[in-house]
Amino acid sequence: MAILPAIMKRESKRSYLNKEVPQAIVEELLEALRWAPSCRNYQPWRVTVVQSEEGRTKLASALAPGNEWAAKAPLAVIVSSNPKDDMNLGGREYYLFDCGLAVQNLLLQATEAGLMSHPTAGWKEKSIQEAFQISAEERVLCVIFIGYPGSIDDLDEETKAKDQAPRIRKPLEEWARFF
Ligand SMILES: Cc1cc2nc3c(=O)[nH]c(=O)nc-3n(C[C@H](O)[C@H](O)[C@H](O)COP(=O)(O)O)c2cc1C
């Protein structure tokens, strides 16, 4: 179980091959998500899997400017959740926390399967709710675009520059406290 290399290998890139993700792999991604921990095991996530031409077209039209690259992903997973499913411990919104854990499980399983998976928040929530019959009560939290990694040369210059930007993280001293 070499987890750290898998964590380090995962990255959010933007070019996809025009190649479908096999159903067995889609099921494994959902299985990884399903086994995420959640506060009092509430499992507040709801998932909408988008693979059909029709679904992908609807999703593409909800994308915010700058995220057009996502339209080429053969698979997208929409993660939503109803705030009413929160277990309301100390006024903290654990439904959001739990969904984040679930998304990371899916991202890591995708990495393991040789897929590129890119979480996004850049889309119109209302358009997604309407297109995929997600109730207005349910918040759309993340759309993960997934596919086999393609060539960076297939991207426009602006998107290519984003993909080529170095992946950086704040140094430990900025965010960790030790007592
Ligand atoms: C909740 C969330 C929303 C994001 N939204 C977008 C987005 O709309 N467009 C985009 O290109 N990347 C998006 N990203 C990707 C981040 O920019 C990326 O994770 C971050 O720059 C770190 O890069 P890495 O994932 O390669 O480590 C999002 C990531 C997360 C977790």
Image (tube, grey):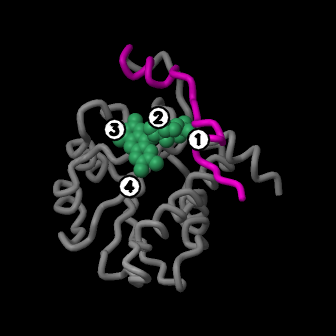
Disc 1 crowd rating (10 Å Cα; few below 14, some 14-19, many 20+) is few
Determine whether the residue tagged by mark 1 lies in a helix, strand or loop.
Answer: helix
The kind of residue tagged 1 is: Glu
Ligand 1 - quadrant of the structure image: top left
The residue pinned by badge 3 equals 71
Image position, residue 32 (x, y; %): 61, 65
Nearest to viewer (mark 3 / mark 1)? 1
Magenta stretch: residue 109 in it? Answer: no
Where 13 sits versus 104, above or below? above
Seen from the viewer's position, the closer of residues 18 and 86 is: 86
Can the viewer see residue 146? yes
Report which residue position mark 4 lands on. Answer: 142
Closer to the camera in the image, 38 or 109: 38
Which residue is the site of mark 1? 174
SS of the residue at dot 3?
helix
Q: Where does the magenta region start and end?
A: 157-179
Determine which residue is flagged by label 2.
18
